Amino acid sequence: MTSRVLGIVGWSGSGKTTLLEYLLPQLAAQGLRVNVIKHSHHDLELEPAHKDSARLRAAGASEVLLASPYRFALIHELRGAPEPTLVEQLARLSAADLTLVEGFKREPIPKLEIHRPALGKPALYLDDIDIVAVASDAASPLLSRQLAWLDLALRDQILAWVINYAKNGVICTS
């Protein structure tokens, strides 16, 4: 399992995936090995129904491992079993310096919230003590607890905070 886990949370449309797309190559360039878990509430369509792997799953295979010289993917059919917990999913991953988790916003893990007031949704940090940093396009309010407040427009500032977190644990800047 990874040494550090950081949730990236926020409402739909806040820019979580866009931020991750920026952070991942930057973190790799720093020599950090980073895993990502992306949670979806929708069914996953990973291959067309006519492909051999999909046909084998439909025929009853519990797991199908697709392997090529470029990547592999393990597809596990739940077939009515409960969805694995985040802890169980983390245990499936290879070792890394950091695992970024998009989704699983109610899990008790350290989190960075992407907060855009223009979306009209409430800030999550107000009710979630596991949020340790907020990246926002709004100015920092008067905070009642220690919380890093990052400018969403200053992606290098967010990157520096994430690198510091990956290497040292939670570092608050406010």
Image: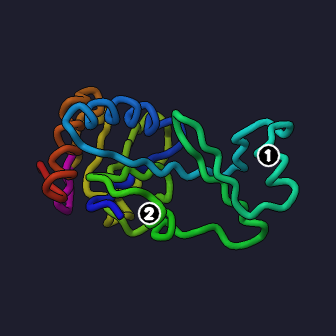
Residue 144 forms part of the magenta stretch: yes
Q: If you read the primary sequence from the N terminus, does the residue marked by circle 2 or circle 1 appear first?
A: 1
Q: What predominant SS class does the magenta segment belong to?
A: loop
Residue at the outermost front position: 69
For label 2, the crowd category at 10 Å Cα-Cα, with few meaning under 14, some 14 to 19 and many 20 or more, is some
Question: What is the count of numbered marks?
Answer: 2
Q: Is residue 89 above or below residue 57?
A: below
**Magenta stretch in the rendered image:** 142-149
Tell me which corner region of the image, top left, top right, bottom left or bottom right, holds residue 111: bottom left
Q: Is residue 171 above or below residue 84?
A: above
Residue kind at label 1, given as amino acid type: Ala
- In the image, 130 versus 31, the foreground residue is 31
Pointer 1: what residue? 54
Drawn side of residue 170 relative to residue 17, left or right: left
Expressed as whole percent of the image width and height from the top left, the position of residue 46 reads 69, 41
Pointer 2: what residue? 90
Identify the residue at image location x=69%, y=60%. Answer: 63
Identify the residue at image location x=55%, y=52%. Answer: 39
The figure's colour scheme reads rainbow
